Amino acid sequence: MSEISIQNVEVSLDNHKILKGIDFKISSGKILALIGPNGAGKSTCMRTLAGLIKPDTGKVSINSKSLNSFSDLRASCGYLIEGADFYGYLSAIENLNLLSSLSSSMNSPEKVLSMVGLSESAHKKVKQFSMGMKQRLGIAQALLSDPDFLILDEPFNGLDIEIKEEVLSLIQNLRDQGKGILISTHLLEEIEALADDFILLDAGRVFMSGDLKSHQENEQVVTFSFDKDFDFTDLQVKVVSQSTRHVSIQTDKEDAKEILKTLISKDQSPYKIEWSGILKDNYKKILDQ
């Protein structure tokens, strides 16, 4: 397994400390979600990883081998930073051919267009592309060098629901092919369902990080909704809130399964079950500070 390790990164801009000693790892075959409110330092972090900003301090290594600078990551990473931008008067294939001629490319433009589902639009001028098509073309250019890692900054910006699902599926497929992927995003529910690990930033510091699955196994708020009135008093659960047709309880996944079995045995099957999100809940804690 390949791994990028980032240690003690600090960045100042105009004498203002933006990143304050952050640490994280990006592993092959995994998606790491980078989240946080506006001003938390997400964009600065992504630009630093792309070698566009020089940090005050910090170490970066790949597979325990130290690199001289963050710019050296470019040999192992593909980037989509601050949206996809191409020559509108050129076609998709012409744009990629141009980019391919400027750097060493392991994948052909035809191959990466096929990977992102744009083969049929290869000869269409980019100015005629939708936002979703441009985002997919942006991911295609990031794949030209066949990198082990992808750094994707807000890849879902401006996408409608259908196209967003397509891009989510594409990223999942790339992860399944062994790519290590760092994604910054505001789509908390979608990324929680997709990511393996997360790092939540608050004012330039790591507020919380870790493996999503292990956090999801801890207690969360689960809301059961029913299509008729129901008395919850005999369930013996930790009730957070309730009405005659809804109850929110604090529980873990295993106990939730047992509660559901009990409800079904009482012929009181809920028509909807909603889990609170780890990312959403902790994001809200930052906003409520």
Image (spheres, rainbow, N blue to C red):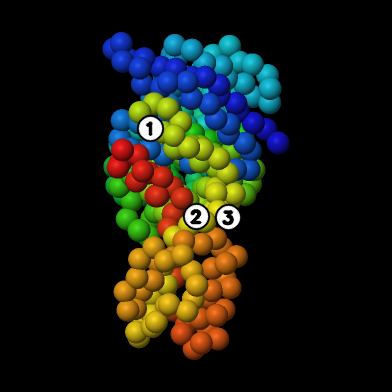
Q: Give the mark, 3 or 2, whose residue is nearer the N terminus.
A: 2
Q: Amino acid at mark 2?
A: Ala
The percent coordinates of residue 251 (x first, y second) are 51, 62
- For the residue labelled by badge 3, is the local secondary structure a helix, a strand or a loop? loop
In the depicted view, which residue is nearer to us: 250 or 56? Answer: 250
CB-based contact (under 8 Å), mark 1 and mark 2: no
Q: Nearer the viewer, residue 64 or 220?
A: 220
> Mark 2 — residue?
193
Q: Nearer the viewer, residue 289 or 181?
A: 289
Give me the residue at 52% from left, 32% from top: 78
Label 1: state its secondary structure: strand
**Left or right position of 197 against 134:** right
Asked if residue 161 lies left or right of residue 103, the reply is: left
Is 192 placed above or below 104 here? below
Which dot, 1 or 2, sits closer to the camera?
1
Q: Residues within 10 Å of mark 1 (few under 14, many from 20)?
A: many
Q: Quadrant of the N terminus?
A: top right
* Numbered tag placed on residue 238 in the rendering: none
Quadrant housing residue 225: bottom left
Disc 3 vs disc 2: which is toward the camera?
3
Q: Which mark is residue 202?
A: 1
Say which residue appears at 30% left-offset and 42% top-offset. Answer: 288
Amino acid at the residue labelled 3: Glu
Q: How many angstroms separate mark 1 from mark 3 (CA)? A: 24 Å
Q: Looking at the rendering, in which quadrant would you find the C terminus?
A: top left
The x and y percentages for residue 196 are 56, 46
Tell me the CA gap for discs 1 and 2: 22 Å
Instruction: Name the residue furthest right.
Output: 1
Mark 3 sits on what residue?
A: 217
Vertical position of residue 72 compared to residue 174: above or below: above
Q: Is residue 102 visible?
A: no
Q: Secondary structure at mark 2?
A: helix
